[in-house]
Image (cartoon, rainbow, N blue to C red):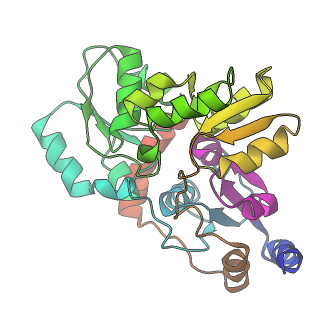
Amino acid sequence: MENSLQNEIAALKRERGAVILAHNYTRGEVQDVADFTGDSLELARRATMVEAEVIVFCGVYFMAETAAILNPGKTVLIPDPSAGCPMADMITGAQLRELKAKHPGAIAVCYVNSTAEVKAECDLCVTSGNAERVMATIPAGTEIIFVPDRHLGGHVSSKEGREYILWPGYCPTHARLTAKAIETARAGHPGAPVIVHPECPADVRAAADERLSTGGMCKFARETSAKTILVGTEIGILHRLKKENPGKSFIPVSDSLVCPNMKKTTLENLAACLRDMSPRVIVPPEIAIPARRAIDAMLAV
């Protein structure tokens, strides 16, 4: 069944002139049929380089929105539009406008894990892979609002040594990881480095050896001499890590780190999406234009 779906997807992709982009957290079989797999930053960059007229985005809805914003003349599809992001839904455009009104003159920065509506209210967008570089471009003494992830915002704020106004949002999947789980994993694999995502809580980040985006994790895995690596992020990344580094072992710090939304894309609904050219992601111009300014400001760094 899987092989027939893979063949159908390949044929439909050629017929539709489509390109398939997939996030590192999606199912392994979905990553295997994608033209490009990456983290949010890599996918945002790739979306600006796509020549195909049809982009199928395998991930969660805000990612497909970003691709649509960056490609206003193209058709952007998502296999399951109900694949949302709980953290992105923790703040609305209206809530951000209210916060900005309380801090006139502040620079509003959003993590890419936010809705197009929220991006449209921001001056800058960041990803976990470039947040430190992008935030460093904001002049000292400037008041900074950072939404929606308090953990990523706190991580970069502590690295910079300056305070941000943090929205109390978080990723429910990464919030499940504990420092105790890291301690237990280390005991079972002495000497193995622990890498975690900066969306994790502060005590988890402090207990790890490296705090990296998934793209950063892939780079670390390629370059480290360690043969066993303990991984503290959504377990979908293990497929890519093992595929790219067959001589190394990757152990999840916790088997509970599963994002149900990232798993909503399947070979079945991916094939149906290409077959029907639906569901399509459309961002209204009044939101897309200001949202693109925030994304472009990020990509320019």
Q: Is residue 163 above or below residue 294?
A: above
Residue 292 in view here: yes
Q: Residue at x 71, y 79 (%)?
A: 268
Outermost residue, left side: 102
Q: Which residues are magenta?
A: 19-45
Is residue 127 positioned above or below 207 on the image? below
Of residues 207 and 295, the one drawn nearer to the viewer in this rendering: 207
Q: Residue at x 12, y 42 (%)?
A: 101
Q: Is residue 133 one of those drawn in magenta?
A: no
Would you say 128 lies left or right of 120 here? right
Q: Is residue 251 left or right of residue 225?
A: left
Label tally: 0
Which image quadrant for residue 135?
top left
Q: Residue at x 41, y 45 (%)?
A: 175
Q: Identify which residue, 199 or 59, lies in the foreground.
A: 199
101 or 268: which is nearer to us? 268
In screen coordinates, is 253 left or right of 163? Answer: right
Classify residue 270 by image quadrant: bottom right
Q: Position of residue 148 (x, y in %)?
A: 33, 45
- Let me know if residue 212 appears in the view: no
The residue nearer to you, when weighing 30 against 120, is: 30
User: Which of the 4 image quarters holds residue 64?
Assistant: bottom right
Based on the picture, tell me whether residue 41 belongs to the magenta stretch. yes
- Residue at image x 59%, y 58%? 71
Q: Is 35 placed above or below 149 here?
A: below
Q: Residue furthest bottom?
A: 276
Q: Quadrant of the N terminus?
A: bottom right
Instruction: Residue 74: give x, y in percent of width and height.
Output: 63, 66
> In the image, residue 76 lies at what x, y percent?
60, 67
Where is residue 243 drawn, in percent x and y?
A: 83, 46
